[in-house]
Image: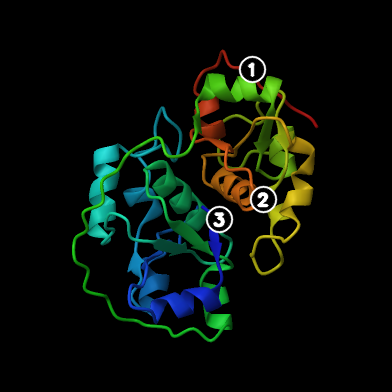
Amino acid sequence: MGTPLISAADLSELLRGAQPPTVLDLRWRLAGPPGRDDYDAGHVPGAVFVDLDRDLCGPPGAGGRHPLPHPQALEGALRAAGLREGDPVVVYDGGDGLAAARAWWTMRWAGVADVRVLDGGFPAWTAAGGAVDTGQPSVARGDLVVRPGGLPVLDADDAAALARDGVLLDARAAARFRGETEPIDAVAGHIPGARNLFYGELVNADGTLRGDLAEIFAGFEGEPVGAYCGSGVTAAHTVLALHAAGRDDAALYVGSWSHWITDPARPIGTGA
């Protein structure tokens, strides 16, 4: 379906068109409250705020910290945000691309065909001179039907097999991968056989995706590839980057490390 990204200039042009896309604001903080206050302070005109944790993920627990939502619950949340069958969607966040990438992945998994991420997020929009609104748009309830299975998903067994027989990328910082520190989850380390590729190596200083992603991923050609992280948010960004580089087959271990460690029988890798 082409690039999963859209520039601020292209989004501005689409919003002036006869059939503008539905725009969702996904500003979010891992260790803080939702980004609703940021949205209220100013957002892309017409954008609807969506809470990543509440609307696009299931409750934390045995499935990990950010498991897949129940399809019916996801459908209700997306309809409440105004999504209609066949309409294009653009998502953005505060600039690091993480929440927007997970929203993109979740909607693509749910069968929404045309979803794009604003490259560079809200900072890119304002830097390009985009208009900013503080009002709450009136949203007509949509009619979107969630059809799970639009993107490949890994469970724990799949992730272990991919680490052994293909390429499983760990998107966390190197120290977490090596097991030297673990600020969030109860156990440190990584899935044995995984390769560490910190998501920060895929972006420019302004949060936009690098232009040489195909070169970064060139060594994986011909091998199945997937990604995981702490809870399936940062790894969704890696999957987004893989799609941008032409790897539409890239899979996501949604439960990621926070799910892997729920079974003490699963092995733990440490070191490089």
Q: What residue type is labelled 3?
A: Gly
SS category of the residue bearing label 3? loop
Between 260 and 226, the one lying in front of the other is 226
Residue 2 has which mark? 3
SS category of the residue bearing label 2? loop
Going 39% across and 61% down the picture, which residue do you hit?
Answer: 89
Task: State the residue lying farthest toward the top.
Answer: 265
Q: Where is residue 243 in the image (x, y as percent from the top left)?
A: 60, 48
Q: Name the residue under label 1.
A: 267
10 Å crowding of disc 3: few (<14), some (14-19), many (20+): few
Q: Is residue 161 above or below residue 74?
A: above
Sequence-wise, which precedes: disc 2 or disc 1? 2
Residue 218 has which mark? none
Q: Name the residue under label 2.
A: 245
Going 60% across and 29% down the picture, which residue do you hit?
Answer: 187
Going 65% across and 30% down the picture, which residue do you hit?
Answer: 224
10 Å crowding of disc 2: few (<14), some (14-19), many (20+): some
Q: What residue type is labelled 2?
A: Ala
Q: Is residue 33 above or below residue 177?
A: below
Between the residue at mark 3 and the residue at mark 2, the CA separation in whole angstroms equals: 10 Å
- The part of the image, by quadrant, that contains residue 171 is top right
